[in-house]
Each structure stands twice: as structure tokens, then as C-alpha cells.
Image: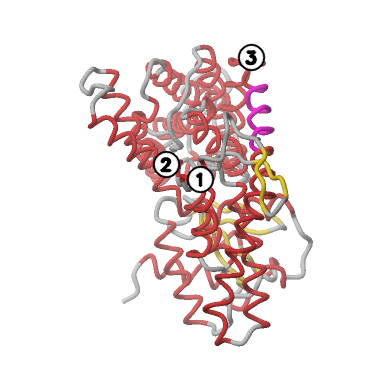
Amino acid sequence: MMGKTEALAKQLLDLMGGADNVVSVTHCATRLRPQLRDHALVDAKQIEALEGVTGVVDKESGIQVVIGTTVGEVYEAFLKELGTESDVKEHPIEEVKKERHLLNDFVALVVSIFSPLLPLLAGSGLLRGFTILANELGWLSTESTTNLVLTLAATSVFYFLPLLVAVTSANRFKTSPFIAMAVMGALIMPGFIELIQGDGGNMVSFLGISIPVFNYTSQVIPAILTIWLQSKMEHFMKAKLPNSLHMIIIPTVLLLVLVPIAAGIFGPIGNYLSIGIANVVGWLASINQIVTGAVIGGIWNILIMFGVHWAPNTMVIIPEIARTGSSPFIAYGANANFGMAGAAFAIFLRSRNQKLKNFSLTAITSVLLSGIVEPAIYGLGVKFKTPLIAGCLGAALGGAFMGAFNVIGNAFVFGGLTTIPAFAGPTLWAYIVGLIISFVGGLILTLILGVKDPEAEMSAINKMGGNK
């Protein structure tokens, strides 16, 4: 008998036009992201109505199906259905003849590279948070070897981030992950680190050519660029060389060529890009922390709604945490989750529609326990409009409060109750108060604005614009 997950995967595939219409599929923390040949074959309304689907982002450039925390299971079942219903090999996305959308392509690339790392980033973040919390409470001495071991366990992910990104990039570009690790590993070996003087940028000689050297631990841009080039070279050599020579020639050539290119070209490019992004972030944060917190908190749900929040996540927040050990933006963004949770709670309190009350409770639980806000955004915010407005405004209030007290987060985690330890430190209290402000703000503003859709069946509770 087919289980619920398998049944959902089959229904999704059917409503996407069948296996022949699916070019490839990836997923992030909550969404299934297929690449399709013909968007016209997709029945988005039927997909959104399926049990187990909490929303659909349907645009001409593609479709994203919001599943929630079980998206990994649905993804695996979808792949099985894709394999059993069609013998079509996975085609390169470039074969699909449609207008290119650079932003969507970039986001899809980022999602495919960083999604596999999210559990590790979250787990290391929580471990780091608990360690800092133990330091703050006096339970663990910062001078102890126990503290050192726990700190190393929590921060190794950022030191070796180039290697981790090399592996996921290799999977994305369909090239050897072991060669990718070896290439990027050369740039973080002790011998290479010893070449760096001060903050880096000093010149060293390679075959008579002067190249600048920097510390590439924690950097991701050089890894992505280098492994992309590796894939092009490896695919070319596999097509041109006899199979008997693949094992010896390809790894040798790739190591010989790519390590110097990574050290002399892609590494410096990535470093200067990182510096530029860091300067922009610093400038933005220095304008006015209250305004910055309000803006980031207020717009974050909109970025999530359109699926473009991964751009600032990977280009700003993760690099900043890797470089400095903390980021205020991860704290500001958490307000968006609690603003929507407050809006969902208002619907739970006042709706007479039992199905909607149950869904609201599920959406709130998703935010509080896992930091996943998409069910609230798509199932309530986008559907009824005013909860989204209220949630964003509530989040802006919480973000402004956090900005006033310079709140920071110590790790890349999704904002929820279970991830609060990741914000341990002197500003922890302000982080918690900011979340409360966002939740209460989203709740009260939803009650004031009301929900005018009859399906919500909201009870009459006020005379200031709510429904009767």
C-alpha cells in the first residue's frame, strides 16, 4: 500500500505534467524546486489543494512547492516516482528553451549548494550557543579544555567551509567531489597559511608570476568558482580522452591547473568580493541600527515569499558569521517568523473554521519548534493578505527593538524557540523581548485589521475594522 509521502509525490508529478516535463529537481529547507520544460502543463491550483502542500510559488520562470520540514522525504519519493515513470535521463537545465531569469537561476544554484549544509550549520550553531550560554552562566570556564573542545566542534564547520562547499558544488556541477576537496584543501593547508602575512594580500611567486595570498578558511566564493571550472574541464577531458587514461590523467591535470588558478585568480576575486560585501553590510548596519532592524525584520517574509531570501543568507549572513562569529541580520530576520506566528495565533483565536484553526496551530508549531515560517506565509498570509501585512509590521517592530540594543546572533539558524541558545550573550534578553514584540505585534495587528475573506469565518471582536 502506498504511503502518504509516496502518494503525494505521485500526485505532484502528475500535476506537473508527468516525468517527461521534469528536467531536474532540487529542494531547500521547506520547498520542492523542480525545473520544468513546459510551465503550461502545471496545475498550480490543484497542487496547492493537495494535503501536505502548504503553498505554491507559481511564476513564469518556475514553480516552487512549499512542503515544510518533511520536504526531504517528499523529494526522495519524488525522485523514485520520476525514475519509475520515465527512463528519461536528467537533462541539463540549459536544454530547456525558455527565457532566462538570472536571479531565479542564481537562487536555484545557491539553494542546491547550501541546502545540504543547513542541518550542519544549524547543529553547530546550537552547540556554539549552548557553549556560550554555559560560559555566561558560569557553568563552564572559558579557559578550560572542555570549552576549547566544544568551541572547536561548533566552529570547525566554518574553518572547513570551503571543503564542504566544494563537495556540494561538485554534486551540483556533476564533477568529482574528492578532487574538489583536494583542490580547495590545498588553500587551507598549514603550508599555504604560513605564506600569509598579516591580513593577507602580500605577494608570493609561482612560476615567476606574483600572486596575492589570503586566508581562505571560511570563504565560499572561491570554492564555487573553482569547482564550476573543474566540472567544465573534467567533462571535456572525459569526452576527449580514452577511458583507460581517465584515472591517471584527469586528477593530475585538475590538481596541476586548478590549485594555482584557485590561489592566484578565483581566491583573490572571492576575497575582494567578500570584502566589498562586508563593507556594504557594515555601511548598512552603521546608518541606524533601529531603522536597519525594522527594515530587515519587515521585509524578510516578503523575501521568503518570493524565495529570494537565500541570496542575502548566503552572500551576507553566512559569510559574516564565518568571518566575525556573529551577525545582527540573523537576529533581525528571526522577527519575521514570530510576526507571522502572532498573526496565525490571532486566526486560531478568532476563526470559527475548525480546519483553519487546526492549520493555524500547525503553522505556529512549525515556527516555534523548527523556525519554518512558510506554512504561515502561504497558508494564511498570502491567502488572506492582512495576516501577512500584520506579520511584517509586527516583525518590523521587533527588529527595531533589537536594533536599538545591537542584538547579534552567533550562528546561522532559523528563528524559533529551539534555536534561542544560538543568540546567547549579553544581548540575549533583547533578542527574546524582540521576538515577543514581533509575536504580540502580529497578533494585535491581525485582530485590528481583521480578515475579510468569508472562508476565515472570523468572529466579530472589534469595531475598528475587523469583521462581523
| Spot occupied by residue 20 in the image (x, y as percentages of width and height) | 61, 78
- Residue 240 occupies which quadrant of the picture? bottom right
Residue 258 within the magenta-colored segment of the rendering: no
Q: How far is disc 1 from disc 2 in space, using C-alphas?
A: 8 Å
Disc 1 is placed on an element classified as helix
Badge 2 crowding class, 10 Å Cα cut-off, few under 14, some 14 to 19, many 20 or more, is: many
**Reading the chain from its start, which is encountered first: label 2 or label 3?**
3
Would you place residue 232 above or below residue 224 in this image?
below
- Point out the tag, 3 or 1, that comes first from the N-terminus: 3
- For the N terminus, the image quarter is bottom left
Q: Is residue 327 above or below residue 250?
A: above
Q: Disc 2 to disc 3, how far (Cα)? A: 33 Å
Residue under label 2: 363
Q: Residue at x 59, y 27 (%)?
A: 296
Residue 49 visible to the viewer: no
- Amino acid type at circle 1 is Gly
Crowding near the residue tagged with mark 3, few <14, some 14–19, many ≥20 C-alpha atoms within 10 Å: few
Give me the residue at 47% from left, 19% from top: 407
The answer to whether residue 229 is left or right of residue 1 is right
The residue nearer to you, when weighing 43 against 311, is: 311
The Cα atoms of the two marked residues, 3 and 1, are separated by 34 Å
Q: Which of labels 3 and 1 is toward the front?
A: 3
Location of mark 1 (residue): 379
Which kind of residue does numbered mark 3 sit on? Asn
Tell me if residue 445 can be seen.
Answer: yes
Upstream in sequence: badge 1 or badge 2: 2
Q: Which residue is mark 3?
A: 288
Q: Secondary structure at mark 3?
A: loop
Q: Badge 1: how crowded within 10 Å, few (<14), some, or many (20+)?
A: many
- Which residue is depicted at the point 55% across and 70% down? 251
Write the start and end of the magenta stretch as one range.
274-284
